[in-house]
Image: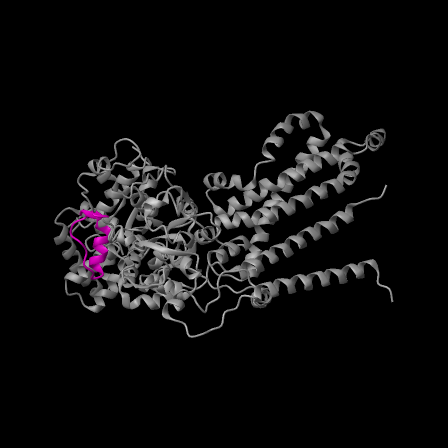
Amino acid sequence: MTLTLNQRAAVLSVVLLLAGLLVWEVSIAAGGAGSAELTEYEKLTGGGAPKAGVPPPSQVIAKAWAELSDPFYDAGPNDKGIGIQIGYSIYRVLSGYLLAALVAIPLGFLIGMSPVAWRALNPFIQVLRPISPLAWMPLALFIIQDSEASAIFVIFICSIWPMLINTAFGVAGVRADWVNVARTHELGTLRTAFTVILPAAAPTIVTGMRISIGIAWLVIVAAEMLVGGTGIGYYVWNEWNNLDLTSVIFSILMIGVVGMALDAAFGVLQRAVAYAE
Amino acid sequence: MPIKSLGDPFAAKTDLRHGAACGCEGCRSDAAETVAADSEAMLERAIESAVVRSMFGHSDVSRRSFMGMVGGSTVAAALASVFPMDKAKAAILDTLGAPEKTDLTIGFVPITCATPIIMAQPMGFYEKYGLNAQVIKTAGWAVARDKSLNGEYDASHMLTPMPLAMTLGAGSVAEPYIMPAVENINGQAIVLSNEHLDKRDPAQWKGFTFGVPFEFSMHNFLLRYYVAEHGLDPDVDIQIRVVPPPEMVANLRAGNLDGYLSPDPFNQRAVWENIGFIHILTKEIWEGHPCCAFAAPLSFATELPNTYGALLKSIVDATQYASDPANRKEISAAIAPTNYLNQPVPVIEQVLTGRFADGLGNVQDVPDRIDFDPFPWHSMGVWILSQMKRWGYIEGDVDYRGVAEQVYLAADCRKIMEDLGYEAPAETYRSHTIMGKTFDPAAPEAYVESFAIRKA
């Protein structure tokens, strides 16, 4: 029986994962003190209690099991299940992201189709693009006067640039032949844009969208750590507050999984709009 | 039931100048309704009106402004404590000052200084005064300030210097803030990393990096004061960084900080994690110093006077409850869960009960390591302003007393303390002794000048 390339890769992945977890578990388990009778001082310094240290994977898995078995509990404004926290984060990411898409794609089209607009707007884009999204946070909090809207604004401002630039690039890069063919068929500008340029530029646009959603997900965690309240970033901060590394590692994994899922969704979209020449 | 002659004497809006003989438009049109009113209630009202009028003489304006300022229910309760009013009466009195808004949002930073604000929720102090308040955990002081400024929080846990600074516009936009109650006194410590076990003398701290939770904090001012008294210039000889409380322990472990003056539980947490030791409790620097406070924008008190009164009442009540050592274990268990401080119970317990491991191998017993006392002494405000002046946070002529009296609402706090049956100080100024040096609140400028190490 021979395995396909994919199957062999999957087996190798699992083996690597298990080996990694084993090394991790063994290296942590080494430090375990015997539980003799504790003096009062030892008790007060947490002699028997677990210390904030790197936890073994078994603990992380136990934590994950506990959290994921009841992901939507709500025990007050500062203590919600992981599912609710991630829900808040995704809601913020998507709100900011959709707003950005509404602005970036039409604007990118305009810039891509008009060399004058490209040159005129390029300096602004180049200055604004490299600004770290979180640098906007204090300003946003001050001007918008609402932490929820500020977080969404930060997502907006960080997701807009890759979409804008990729759309403009994709539109500008549509083969001149195709546009000329459209012109000989006497298609109007709008019709050309939708029937010729959009399909031709779609793969580049979706690539920009895919980059954007990745950045947006990176940023929301940091933004929520700063503002607090709800969301996966708040969850990490709150557990850090308690120096509970088990929960921190668990939430890092959750962030990774959600990020992967978002990226995969755009991967599907990308394949859908791709075309072979 | 707008009966002018028997209008609610505890409401700021009503006018008591109209009497039964008054023939004015308002009184005549209301006459018909008078009959319909429950006679018993009217009798009660009449008694109240008489009592209140006798208290304020003929100055209805001063009565109205007073009710507006303190809240009718407060005064009603005050009267109830003086006049023998029966229980049926008390029930009516309760409905008099119904809060205009019951759903409140109160911000807190997860430290033990916020104990009264936090415990008031799980232990039902807000409910007791008819409020449905949610306490919201906040990531740091700058965010607490911004969320408070932009109205997301109705009131907030703050550091005692913050409302002063915000009112002056130091480090933020100027917005009048009020601080009607202090939360805790004492309750902080200087913690050093275990690497510095042999450096107990501050003279050896040259080049150290310290963390404080916020610029406008007692932590910053006490640390500066402490090292300056030991001959170090805090702006030159050591580095002071602003680090949010929860990040202190991690930074200490990473060697990023040599020590910090931070709120608990993070001092005790450093000992619990075997990273640092408690060098000195701040109560040894200034016994009874203020630390954190309950603050709100001035607009909250003026626009929602009854809500403000009820909220202040719950806070003062909770603060007094927390000051009883017998209640501290129960409180520790109430505020330790994830929804509040999110800390191990034994750590909180050591902070609140004052029986703690100091990280040097001793178990210490200091019952007032942290204590709770709501009274906002004006003299404390003046001291804080004197230190802000000393270290260059504010410049020029400072109206020490004016600002302190505008922000620290000692009169409101005293009123509520007395209503609740607690003893409140008659004075609002007193001298304080800090590291053996006496501070006279009457001469703040001379006090600032008296320090050899200062910026201004």
- Residue located at (60% from left, 29% from top): A124
| Residue B267, quarter of the rendered image | bottom left
Q: Give the answer, above or below, for where B385 lies relative to B89.
A: above
Q: Nearer the viewer, residue B245 or A107?
A: B245
Dividing the image into 4 quarters, which one contains the N terminus of chain A? bottom right
Residue lying farthest to the right in this orientation: A1
Q: Give the answer, above or below, for where A14 lies relative to B172.
A: below
Residue B293: percent from the left, percent from the top? 32, 51
Decide whether residue B433 is among the magenta residues.
Answer: yes
Instruction: Report whether A152 appears left or right of A23.
Output: left
Decide whether residue B423 is among the magenta residues.
Answer: yes
The answer to whether residue B120 of the structure is visible from this angle is no
Residue B207: percent from the left, percent from the top? 40, 41
- Residue located at (34% from left, 68% from top): B330
| Residue B444, quarter of the rendered image | top left
Residue A106: percent from the left, percent from the top? 67, 36
Q: Name the colouring of the figure.
A: one colour
Instruction: Report whether A23 appears left or right of B237.
Output: right
Instruction: Report whether A161 appears left or right of B352.
Output: right
Dividing the image into 4 quarters, which one contains the C terminus of chain A? top right
- Residue located at (62% from left, 31% from top): A126
Residue lying farthest to the bottom in this orientation: A37
Q: Give the magenta-colored segment's residue range.
A: B411-436
Residue A232: percent from the left, percent from the top? 55, 55
The answer to whether residue A194 of the structure is visible from this angle is yes
Q: Nearer the viewer, residue A172 or A7?
A: A7
Q: Nearer the viewer, residue A209 or A215?
A: A215
**Labels in figure, total:** 0
| Residue A119, quarter of the rendered image | top right
